[in-house]
Image: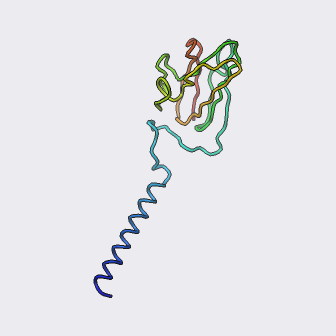
Amino acid sequence: MNSKTYGIIISAIIVLVLVGAIFYFSNTPGRQQKQSSDNYVPNQTGAQTKEIVFTDLGFSPPVLTIKAGTTVVFKNNSSKDFWPASAKHPTHNEYPIKGGCVGSIFDACKAIAPGGQWEFKFDVLGGWNYHDHLNPTFFGKVVVE
């Protein structure tokens, strides 16, 4: 084998190793980009749905403990509109992933009429206070484990 052929073979092997390393590290779990929180838990399997009901007396249950990746359905069983949103009023910025219409993505961004509902998937570990933006004296907490 001459040195030119040997050089081509070595170059091809180096390129294959580099391409393989790039592919491996870009698809390794745990190397995916997190969403603005060190407590973010992406892609939970076996995700559940839980319910919080808003009545004329407030939220029930007032504290709900769930696993990361659970979707919480906020149901309006009251006689008036409500607007579930992350605490603190009026900034809605306690939940750490920013976006939504005011502060964080944990915000319905509109009033929910009686009989209506809004859902939110909790992916960040911690205790997350929330309130009714239309009447901030009503509040609750979702604890994500």
Residue extending furthest toward the bottom = 1
Q: Where is residue 9 in the image (x, y as percent from the top left)?
A: 36, 78
Q: Which residue is drawn at 48% across and 49% down?
A: 30
In terms of image quadrants, where is residue 71?
top right
Q: Which of 138 and 98 is in front in this view?
A: 98
In terms of image quadrants, where is residue 106?
top right
Q: Residue at x 45, y 38 (%)?
A: 38
Q: How is the image coloured?
A: rainbow
Q: Position of residue 102 (x, y in %)?
A: 48, 23
Quadrant (top left, top right, bottom left, bottom right) of the C terminus: top right
**In the rendered view, does 39 fall on the left or right side of 75?**
left
In terms of image quadrants, where is residue 23?
bottom left
Q: Where is residue 80 in the image (x, y as percent from the top left)?
A: 66, 13
Q: Is residue 29 above or below residue 71?
A: below
Q: Where is residue 109 in the image (x, y as percent from the top left)?
A: 55, 23
Q: Nearer the viewer, residue 85 or 102?
A: 102
Q: Nearer the viewer, residue 140 or 110?
A: 110
Tell me how many marks there are: 0
